Every structure is written in structure tokens, then in C-alpha cells.
Image (tube, rainbow, N blue to C red):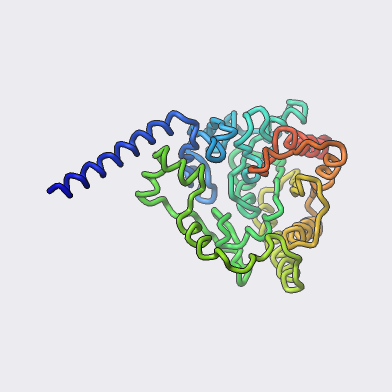
Amino acid sequence: MQTIRTLAVAVLSALACLLALEGVFRVLPVSTATLMGYHHDPDLLTYPPHHQWTISTGWDLRNAQTLRSNASGFAADRDFVRDPDAVALIGDSYVEASALPAPDRPAPQLQHALGGGRAVYAMGTPGTTLLDYAQRVRYASQQFGTRDFVLWLEAGDLRQVRCGSGNIVSRCLDPGTLAPRIERWPAPDAIKRLVRHSALAQYIFGQLKFNPGKAWADLQRVGSPAHRPANPPQTATEKAAAQALAKAAVQEFLAQVQPYQARRLLMVVDGHHDGSALGDGAIDGERQVLIEHLQVAGLEVLDLQPIFARHRAASRLSPEVGPYDHHLNAQGVRMVMQAIAARLHP
């Protein structure tokens, strides 16, 4: 009986501690549930309409921001309306820029750089890639009559178009055959839905990025030989694979966007934010191959690498949010948006 009483006290004490921590974290700016899903279109991952959530970084909750979605489910300060003169700015978390105050994010800065006369629709979805961007071109064209599109690609976009990459919400290429496929997120189970609404769970798994499986794998690797470098030189086989993947990805992208007859389709390719020279690593090699295939296909490309190199030569200030977050800060976004505006001006 004493053992049962002791166990009950221990359990109740633990529950009381968890409830107290839950209350504390609900007061702090812990990242809250985004509730992303296929709310508007089976090929678009968006937030619920007019949803509000908090984003912050790390254990100390840096760069806390409150974001709101518009009627279309994108993090934007305006509802998108039918406007053939509007510019759709499409991409991943670089377009959403959740660590920045709303006026410093890419869409407001691009609208300002264009003189304020044209609306800019921010259609950024974190964790997505090139073929998913094509679906947003389709959606913007059908729903809002958009004819001018700016797509912001990052260096890893080429390898991420493969199904199973973890960056797919709709269209992708089969890793073996490079044939187009559709791969969508599964609906969250009951446990995930519950965790979404716990501030303590969000802190542990979101802020601290705790992943039990990864933690166990890391423990098993202790004392093992050094891992392969993150960006090793490309082998001949990897170069050939990158060429085939780039050709297939660009062809599939064009096939998806061709029916919507864009007036302007500007492909912006990210570079080294610190301005360092491109190397012979796999990521840089894939980036160059992607640019070449985009240009061969007749698409307009804006390479951001020279812009970051000029910034490095002129300033010691980093264009990134911080060493813990490689997204662009307000000044870095401004450089990119000014370069885009210079291309879009008639």
C-alpha cells in the first residue's frame, strides 16, 4: 500500500510539474501550431484562412514574430484579389521570412522597390521546391489572373525535387526513373494533433528540435569514423546524375506552367550569402547545372551570387539573420528585392 501511495504521489507531482511548465510556456513566445494542410487546393500546402501563430528560434526564443494568414492561407498582410498587374512572389521560407517584422519581409520590400504601384503577393511555403512552385503559378493564374511571376530558388532545390526528399507537398520526380509523380503529406494522427496544441511539446520538439530517433542515431555514431563532408566534390557519376535530374525537373516544370501563359517568369537563384566563391562541391555543382538548364529552356534567370559577392567586398555586415539562422535579414532581403525590381521595371 505504501508503494502504491508513493507512486501515486510521484505521478501527481510529475503531472503538476508538467501543467506548471505548460502554463509558463503558454505565456512565453513559443512557436505555436501552424496547422498547415491542404486547405484550399489538393496541390497547395497552406495555413488555414485568417490563422494566427507565433514563430521563434531556439531555446531562448529569438526573433519572435506573430504571423497571420490571409484568406488564401499564405502568410501575407493582404488578401489576394484578382489583379492581372500583380506580381506573385513564389518560394519557400525565404519568401515567407518569418523571422522578420512584416514590413521587412520580401513582398512588402519588393512592392516598395517597384514604386508601390503594383501589388506583390507573397506565396511562400516553407520546405517546398521547384515543382511545388509550379502549382502556385497555376493557382495564382487561375484564381487571381496573375501573369508576372518571380520564383526564388535555393541551391538545394534540384535534389529536393525527388520524391521522398522531405521537401515535397505535391509534384515530384521518381528517384529512380525521374518520371513525374504526386506525393502529398499524410493527415496528422491524433497524437500529432494533440502535440500541436501543447506549448511545452512545441518547445521541446520545435524550439529544441529534439528528435528521439536522431538522438539515438547520434549516440550510435559516437566514436565512429568522421562523416562525409556536407558538400564534397562531385564525382563524375554525380555530375551525370545532376544533369539528368536538372533536365527532367526543368522539362516537368515547363510542362506544368506552360498552360498558364505567364507574361513574365523570373527565376531567381540564391547564392552564398557570405559572398564566398562557388566551389566544386555537389551543391554548387547542382546549382550551376540547374541554372544552365533553366537558361537553355529560355527562362529568365537572376543569379544572386554576384550580388552577395559585391556586398562582401563593400561591407563586413552579414546579410543573414544570424549564425543560427541562414535566412536573410532585412538588409539582405532589400538587396535581393532591389535586384528583382531592377529586372521587372520596364
Nearer-the-camera pick, 202 or 127: 202
Q: In the figure, is residue 342 to the left or right of 222?
A: right
Q: Position of residue 65 (x, y in %)?
A: 56, 31
Q: Nearer the viewer, residue 291 or 234?
A: 234
Give the quadrant of residue 27: top left
Relative placement, left or right, of 279 versus 139 is right
Residue 251 rendering spot, x and y as whole percentages: 70, 61
Question: Is residue 267 in view from this perspective?
Answer: no
Res 185 visible: yes
Report the residue at 76% width, 65% height from top: 233
What residue lies at 30% left-to-right and 41% top-to-bottom? 14
Residue under the point 84% across and 45% down: 309
Could you tell me residue 281's position as x and y percent? 76, 62
Figure check: 145 above or below 278: above
Looking at this view, name the residue that lies furthest to the left.
1
- Residue 145 at x, y percent in the picture: 64, 39
